[in-house]
Image: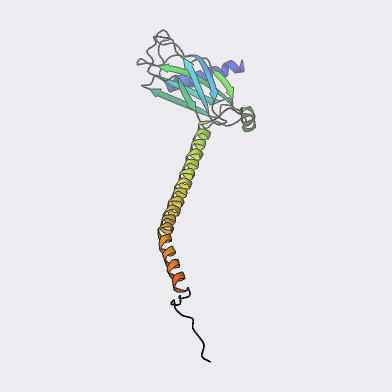
Amino acid sequence: MEENGFNAALLFLGYLSVSSVDADTLSAPLNVTIEFKGVNSALVKWDIFEGDPVIGFAITQQKKDMRMLRFIQEVNTTTRSCALWDLEEDTEYIVHVQSISMSGTSPPSETVLFRTPKESEKLASKSPDEVTMEEVDQAAQLRAGELIIIVVVLVMWAGVIALFCRQYDIIKDNEPNNNKDKAKNSSECSTPEHPTGGLLRSKV
């Protein structure tokens, strides 16, 4: 009985937020589901009847203890999902969805009750293969940094090799001159030859 009264109050709040329309004109959304994106965020998804002239949606989000009520409305969109943000961990929420047409809004969908996970539960349920977009961006940044380091090292090695080759060419070009200087110096230091002729005799 208390639950029925609570649902009636919730529906009344929804009708105060948007103008209602004849139920025969627009059907209530179907298959409303919740997909958790983290401890503090979730994604509401739903379907509509084919042929309904839907141009937007309206979502009523409320804590089960009725301490908070949030109303989200978007028009000129064909999206069938909506993000819920600033959720508290380990807290029960109630959500229902309404379709919007040019004539007004549909009846509310069936009420969906869900509880946000705890931080510890979210970390424990995360599989090793699960990779978030943030982790992908971080990995890409690391790869970019590694590539930059590799390129810098290769450029430095290329510079060292080029400098070594240049110094080697200079040393090689100077080597014949050094050989000539050595040959010249050796010839100057050698003993002069005596002229050919008779033997030198010492004075008596």
Q: Is 69 situated left or right of 115 in this image?
A: left
Of residues 64 and 122, the one nearer the viewer is 122
Q: Position of residue 18 (x, y in %)?
A: 42, 21
Q: Residue at image x 41%, y 7%? A: 24
45 lies above or below 164: above
* Residue 101 lies in quadrant: top left
Q: Position of residue 185 (x, y in %)?
A: 45, 71
Q: Residue at image x 45%, y 67%? A: 182
193 lies above or below 113: below
Q: Residue at image x 42%, y 20%? A: 79
Of residues 79 and 135, the one nearer the viewer is 135
Of residues 118 and 152, the one nearer the viewer is 152
47 lies above or below 173: above
Q: Quadrant of the N terminus?
A: top right
How many numbered discs? 0
Q: Position of residue 118 (x, y in %)?
A: 62, 30
